[in-house]
Image (cartoon, rainbow, N blue to C red):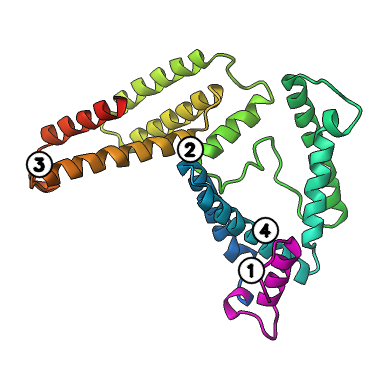
Amino acid sequence: MKPGRDITDLLAIMAALRSPETGCSWDLAQDFASIAPYTIEEACEVADAIQRGDLIDLRDELGDLLLQVVFHAQMASEAGHFSFPDVVEAISRKMIRRHPHIFGEQRDWTPAEVKASWQRIKAEEKAERAAERLSAGAAPEPAGLLADVPATLSPLARAVKLQARAGTAGFDWNDPKAVLAKMREELDEIEVALNQGDNAAIRDEVGDMLFAIANLARHLHIDPDTALSGTNAKFMRRFAFIERSLAVRGRALAESSLEEMDALWNEAKATEKR
């Protein structure tokens, strides 16, 4: 078997890996639950390559993520549930249905009209899926507006998703400055908890503060995970500057004072600004 550029080549590779007679023992031992963490990991590695602007790495990571889709589809096909073409058909149908202004008779919609249509069609699809599950004898989806927000999202991403979903019912602020006021309120509550020495309350209030920060990012159309990833990279870059600067002086981190490291941190900031 040789590598190819067609999706059928990848499907054939996965089928061979899962062949009961001649397949790979590791691949044969897997199921949906055991593969799910790898799927999440590969999606994160795609996002990391994008964050770093590494397009060569992005090509490879997208391939790894595509392999995860093929892997799940192969296992589902073996169990008689669905196959890879069914996955392609389902997403194709969804995209066509959710874009009537592109593939239907509607034209020249504003972004607000597109968003409203998207939400309406999603609600219709959810109702249809519930009816399909009922007719198939499958367990019903969790009830409630927020019930199907995936718990496997990062906490910040899930906070944004929960807030946005609640916002569809009108439970939302219209002004980012209102969120800032909430953040100030949460800061005050953290200070009260600190003064009381109540560790459980401190944890809860810090959680509330992070939730409010995620809400502010959402209102400003900023992905909080991406923003925090950028800050993490900046922190690593500036801390590396501290380490290099100390090494030039023949000093180790453990031998340096906080004041000395803080001065080097400020020097790193000034260098970046220049």
Please report the bounds of the magenta region as a residue range: 1-27
Residue type at mark 2 is Asp
The residue located at (55%, 13%) in the rendering is 175
Measuring from the top left, give residue 210's x and y in whole percent: 43, 31
Residue 186, x across and y down, in percent: 40, 23
**Residue highlighted by disc 2:** 225
Question: Which amino acid lies under the numbered mark 3 shown in the image of this protein?
Answer: Ser
Residue 93 placement: quadrant: top right
For the residue marked with disc 1, what is the amino acid?
A: Asp
Query: Is residue 5 or residue 204 the one in the foreground?
Result: 5
Q: Name the residue under label 3.
A: 256
Gap between marks 2 and 1 measured at Cα: 29 Å
Q: Name the residue under label 4.
A: 69
Indicate the secondary structure of the residue bearing disc 2.
Answer: helix
Q: Name the residue under label 1.
A: 31
Does residue 246 appear left or right of residue 222 in this picture?
left
Q: Crowding near pointer 2: few (<14 within 10 Å), some, many (20+)?
A: some
Query: Nearer the N terminus, badge 2 or badge 4?
Result: 4
